[in-house]
Image (spheres, rainbow, N blue to C red):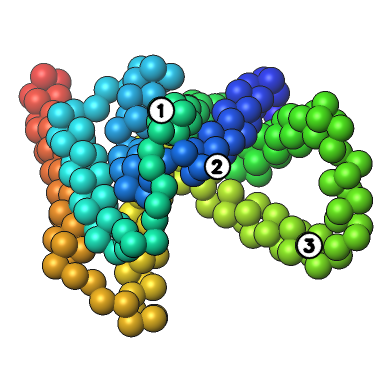
Amino acid sequence: MFRCPFYKYSFCSLSNILSSWFQYEALKFVSFPTQVLAKACKVIPVMLMGKVVSGNKYPLFDWATAAQLGVGTSIFLLSNHDDSGDGSTTTFSGLLCLMGYMVFDSFTSNWQSEVFKYKMSSMEMMFGVNVFSCLFTSWSLISQGSFAESLGFMLRHPDFTFHAVVLSACSALGQLFIYYTISEFGAVVFTIIMTTRSALAIILSCIIYGHPVNGQGAFGLLVAFSSLGLRIWYKMQQKKKAQQQKEDKVPLLAENK
């Protein structure tokens, strides 16, 4: 049986659906640089939401490296953008959509991290969240009168159905890794990985297709990856300090005896 009350899965399921909707709607109303800045700086909203949902406390060093990662990633991604092909502008509606996306996306990973305290498996989390996701999306299609139309489209286009099944299988496999990361390392580490992934994807594209990386891009990479290096160094120092304190307590306990 489920260790977690089943209704709790509905919160992160609904927030995940809403974050996707806001993200896709925002693409219509915001410029490329605004999209980049929002996605690159997701770590800070996740940390803020962690304080709200779980009461987490983060040292000043974590806030500083999170900001550094966002700045470095933004510089790198913007350096690979060609302004000549982008005529979109940012509107107030677009900013509201971006805010909605960041709020609900930050809530999703933090709430999942909170639910994982029930010591469940990644499969349980995926099943519970996807059950509610199916219910919410089906209800939305039925209320709009497009459920039958969607099924008819799938029957008329078997290639689409096959691609959807393959995409769903890959997404399900990816979710297992996502939920494991959140359960073992928390929402902030997961967001850092996803932010770094965007930069790594472009680096891989540059290597495969021979796209040049200019000086601005190289500087952005240096800033971004130095923040990750500093974060790893800081965590190692914290572990060494905790281990040293533990070793110092052993002689004191022996003397007291």
Measure the C-alpha gap from mark 3 to mark 1: 35 Å
Name the residue located 14 percent from the left edge and 67 percent from the top edge: 215
Q: Of residues 70 and 6, which is closer to you in this image?
A: 70
Q: Of residues 247 and 15, which is closer to you in this image?
A: 15
Residue 97: x percent and y percent?
A: 48, 31
| Relative vertical location of residue 207 with respect to residue 81 in this rendering, above or below | below
From the viewer's perspective, tell me whether residue 64 is left or right of residue 194.
Answer: left
Name the residue located 58 percent from the left edge and 49 percent from the top edge: 175
Measure the C-alpha gap from mark 2 to mark 3: 20 Å
Tally of numbered discs: 3
Which residue position is annotated with label 1? 92
Q: Secondary structure at mark 3?
A: helix
Name the residue located 84 percent from the left edge and 46 percent from the top edge: 150
Which residue position is annotated with label 3? 160
Q: Earlier in the sequence, mark 2 or mark 3?
A: 2
Residue 168: x percent and y percent?
A: 70, 55
Residue 217: image quadrant is bottom left
Residue type for callout 2: Tyr
User: Can residue 212 be seen in this snapshot?
Assistant: yes
Q: Earlier in the sequence, mark 2 or mark 1?
A: 2
Of circles 2 and 1, which is in front?
A: 1
Q: In what quadrant of the picture does the C terminus appear?
A: top left
Check disc 1: other Cα within 10 Å, few if <14, some if 14-19, many if 20+.
few
Residue type for callout 1: Phe
Which residue position is annotated with label 2? 24
Measure the C-alpha gap from mark 2 to mark 1: 15 Å
Q: In what quadrant of the picture does the N terminus appear?
A: top right
